Image (tube, grey):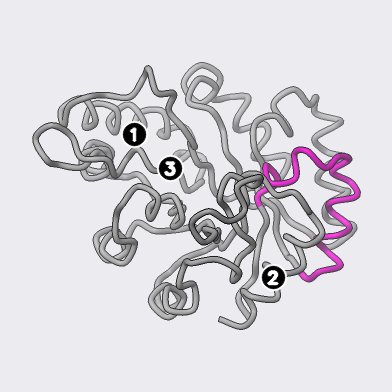
Amino acid sequence: MTKLGFQLYSARNYQPFSAIFKKLAAAGYAEVEGYGALYDDLDQAALDRLSSDLATIGLAMPTGHFSLNMLENDPERVLEITSALKMDSVFCPFLMPDDRPKTAEGWRDFGARLEKAGAPMRDAGLVFGWHNHDFEFAALEDGSVPMTHLMEGGPSLSWEADIAWVIRGGADPLQWIETFKDRLSAVHVKDIAEPGENEDEDGWADVGHGTVDWKGLMGVLKPLPIRHYIVEHDNPNDIDRLIERSIASFQSF
C-alpha cells in the first residue's frame, strides 16, 4: 500500500500539533510534511524532541517546506533542521505576488536562482525542488507559461506537484505530469469542491469528495518514481473529517 503523508499547514488552526500527530497516526498516515512556522524557531533540543515525538507514534517527517529567504540566507540552519528531523526532501513553496517575474527570461532567472539556492541541499544528499501554486500556469504576454521557464532555468530542480493548484491555474495536470515525469518526486493530494460549494473552506474539499479525478490521476502517477504523496487542504473547517475521509479515499484509488 502506498504510504500517505499530511501537510501540517493544513492543521495550523488546530493546535496543539501533538494532538494532530496522534490523530494522523491513528488514521493510518505514515508521514507528515513540515512548514516554516512549525520549526524555523526551534532550538536543537526542541527539534530533537519533535523528531522523537514523531518516531514514538510511528510518524516520519521526510519532507519540508522552507522559504526562499532562509534557503538563500541561512542554508546552514535549513540543514540543521533537515538533519534533526531526518528529512530527505526540501521544497521551496511560494513566491509573493510582487516578486513574480513578468517575462520568460525573468522566470528562467528565477529558476536559476532556485538552482543556486538548492546547491547546499543537493550537496547534502537531499532532493531539492519547487512546490507550485496556480500562478506558474498563467500565460505570459508571449503566450508561454512560467512553469516551463522556471524548470528550464533550474535543470536540477525536482517538482512537488500540487495537482489541485495546477487545475486552478487552468492547466491540464496530465500534460504537466508527462512533461516533468522524470523530475516529479512528491505530490500534494488535494481536492477542489464543486463550484459554489465549501466557500467557507476557500473552495477546497477533502480528498475524494471534490471534482479532481484522483483515481484516474493515481493510475498515471503510480508507475512514476514518486517518493511522497501528501494530503493537503488549505483551509479545512473540520480537521478530523479531513484526516479520516482523505486517507479513506486515497486508499481506494
- The residue singled out by tag 1 in the image is 115
Does residue 129 appear anywhere in the picture? no
Quadrant assignment for the C terminus:
bottom right
Task: Name the front one of labels 1 and 3.
Answer: 3
Q: Which residue is mark 2?
A: 247
Disc with the residue nearer the chain's start (3 vs 2): 3
Which mark is in front, 2 or 1?
2
The residue at the point 69 percent across, 51 percent down is 61
Q: Secondary structure at mark 3?
A: loop
Give the quarter of the figure containing the N terminus: bottom right
Q: Which structural element holds mark 1?
A: helix
Residue drawn where x is 75% and y is 22% of the image: 41
Task: Please report whichever mark, 2 or 1, sits nearer to the chain's N-terminal start.
Answer: 1
Residue kind at label 3, given as amino acid type: His
Instruction: Tell me where residue 130 appears, x and y as whole percent.
Output: 42, 42
Residues 111 and 102: in front is: 102
Stretch in magenta:
7-28
Left or right of 100 on screen, residue 238: right
